[in-house]
């Protein structure tokens, strides 16, 4: 068994995301990031990314986690 972790994300924006920004239809835009949420999930023993982002976030956990301060 081998455990793998995504170290970064990248992708191409869909045209409907670029249209409101006033960019021409023939423009291609790329995006990338460090994906720091994955190592954070491992550190705090989370198996679902929705526990860090979205409606499943436990605010008590966020307030107690030393990396997060509100």
Image (cartoon, grey):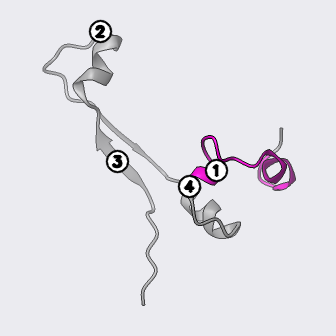
Residue annotated with mark 2: 22
Residue at 57% x, 60% y is 48
Cα separation, mark 3 vs mark 4, equals: 17 Å
Looking at marks 3 and 1 on the same chain, the residue that comes earlier in the sequence is marked by: 3
Residue extending furthest left?
A: 26
Residue at 43% x, 63% y is 6
State the quadrant of the N terminus.
bottom left
Residue annotated with mark 4: 49
State the quadrant of the C terminus.
top right
Categorize mark 1 by other alpha carbons within 10 Å: few (<14), some (14-19), many (20+).
some
Cα separation, mark 4 vs mark 1, equals: 5 Å
Circles 2 and 4: CB atoms closer than 8 Å: no
Magenta-highlighted residues = 50-68
Residue annotated with mark 1: 52
Categorize mark 4 by other alpha carbons within 10 Å: few (<14), some (14-19), many (20+).
some
Residue 64, percent from left and from top: 86, 54
Residue annotated with mark 3: 10
**Element at badge 3?**
strand
**Element at badge 2?**
loop
Residue 10, percent from left and from top: 34, 47
Cα separation, mark 2 vs mark 4, equals: 32 Å
Q: Is residue 65 magenta?
A: yes
Categorize mark 2 by other alpha carbons within 10 Å: few (<14), some (14-19), many (20+).
few
Q: Is residue 62 magenta?
A: yes
Name the mark nearer the viewer: 2 or 4: 4
Circles 4 and 1: CB atoms closer than 8 Å: yes
Q: Is residue 37 left or right of residue 29?
A: right
Name the mark nearer the viewer: 3 or 4: 4
Looking at marks 1 and 2 on the same chain, the residue that comes earlier in the sequence is marked by: 2
Quadrant of the rendered structure where residue 7 is?
bottom left
């Amino acid at each position: 068994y081998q455990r793998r972790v995504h170290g970064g994300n990248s992708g191409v924006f869909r045209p409907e995301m670029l249209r409101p920004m006033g960019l021409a239809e023939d423009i291609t835009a790329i995006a990338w990031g460090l994906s720091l949420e994955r190592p954070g999930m491992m550190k705090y023993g989370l198996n679902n990314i929705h526990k860090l982002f979205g409606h499943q976030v436990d605010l008590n956990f966020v307030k107690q986690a030393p990396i997060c301060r509100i």
